[in-house]
Image (tube, grey):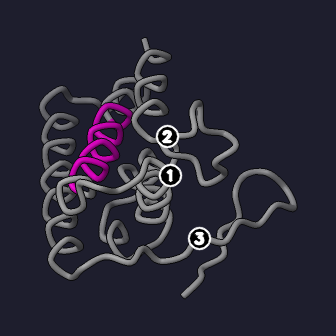
Amino acid sequence: LRFPRAPAMAGLQIEVEEPDLSMELMGQLRVHLSALEADYMKEVRKEGSEAPAQASHCAEKYSDLAAAEIACMLQSFNPEISEEDLARDVHSIIHTQSVVGHLHPPMLTALRECVPLDRRAWSANDIHRHLLRQRRRRP
């Protein structure tokens, strides 16, 4: 299945294929992502992060954790996965609905900003370097 996504760049349409994952892996990813989202929501409430800047920083932090968790889980299920396949699978998980579709909009939006739809916007070709560079850019 292919689902077209329209990124912020006008006129450009990128198709993302659903990831080819086992039901077990999909289930575990959903559970872990839901737990991270629950932690995110608790932190937002605890800090009274009504201020957009605080809530945004919190969303960035948890979206980075979520993307890293997705990569780690994919590698634990397939230790021989190549960097390109890992990056492709993380990208497709984040930009299709099958695994992340249950997340609330603030978390889902932050996750999709953390790992942009257009891979040309990534700061590196592999997911681990991209996430590391994203972390270094944040205050």
Q: Give the foreground label among 3 and 1.
A: 1
Are the two marked residues, 2 and 3, in contact with CB atoms closer than 8 angstroms? no
Residue beneath label 3, please?
A: 16
Secondary structure of the magenta portion, mostly? Answer: helix
Q: Position of residue 101 (x, y in %)?
A: 37, 71
Q: Residues within 10 Å of mark 2 (few under 14, many from 20)?
A: some
In depth, the one of 86 and 103 nearer the eye is 86
Residue beneath label 2, please?
A: 126
Tell me the residue at 47%/26% (across/down).
134
Tell me the residue at 23%/47% (across/down).
72
Look at label 1 and name its amino acid: Glu
Assess whether residue 67 is covered by the magenta stretch.
yes
Look at label 2 and name its amino acid: Asp
Are the two marked residues, 2 and 1, in contact with CB atoms closer than 8 angstroms? yes
Segment tinted magenta in the rendering? 59-73
Upstream in sequence: badge 3 or badge 1: 3
Q: Work out how far the residue at label 2 is from the one at label 1, CA to CA, in angstroms.
A: 7 Å
In depth, the one of 45 and 32 nearer the eye is 32
